[in-house]
Image (cartoon, rainbow, N blue to C red):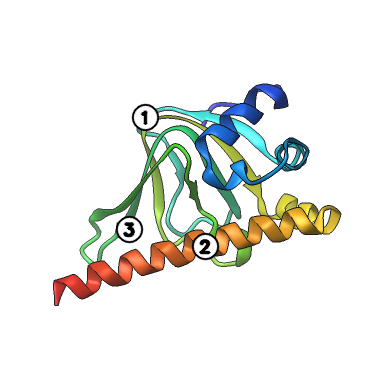
Amino acid sequence: MQPDVRFEIESIQGKVKEEFRFFKSLTNDEIEKFLNFCEFKTGLKGEHLWEEGDTDNYAVFILSGKLGIKKKTEFDKYMIVGTFAKGTVAGELCLLTDRNRSVTAVILEDVEILRLMSEDFERLISEYPMLGLKLLRHIFLVISNRLNRSTARIASIF
């Protein structure tokens, strides 16, 4: 990952609202508050955001580019189990749990992301409970949709 790039909240605010369905339901003030808890990062194709087993706790909101999520198999090979493009969140479970990473995230196309650390997420919830509740609802909706798609894929095998 490239070092933090200083960003103007106003320049990111429009991109966030444009790329993420969830943020379209927030006011500009709420988006600005959210962005104050995030770090803007860039990454190059081939770099890893995290490795399976890592203990870091953060989620990323993808502004541009694409991530591949891969899982190590019992034969020590990796299998891509998902891809995430702009307008999606990845690593969201780490905001809610203290578990190690269960997958590796590799950059498939150069990315621009907003990184939200779990301690900043907790601070956001403490300082802006309604905004935190909206974000939690969105995260649960994302997790629910992904679980439903996974269940449907598994069922289609049988």
41 lies left or right of 152: right
Kindly report the distance in space between the C-alpha atoms of the residues bearing marks 1 and 3. 18 Å
72 lies left or right of 87: left
Q: Residue at x 83, y 58 (%)?
A: 126
At numbered mark 3, what does the secondary structure look like: helix, strand or loop? strand
24 lies left or right of 70: right
Picture coordinates of residue 27, whole percent (x, y): 72, 41
Residue, disc 2? 141
Q: Residue at x 23, y 72 (%)?
A: 154
Q: Say if residue 4 shows up in the picture.
A: no
Q: Is residue 98 above or below residue 17?
A: below
- Under mark 2, the amino acid is Leu
Local crowd size for mark 3, using a 10 Å CA cut-off: few (<14), some (14–19), many (≥20): some
Kindly report the distance in space between the C-alpha atoms of the residues bearing marks 2 and 3. 23 Å
- Under mark 1, the amino acid is Lys
Dot label at residue 45: 1
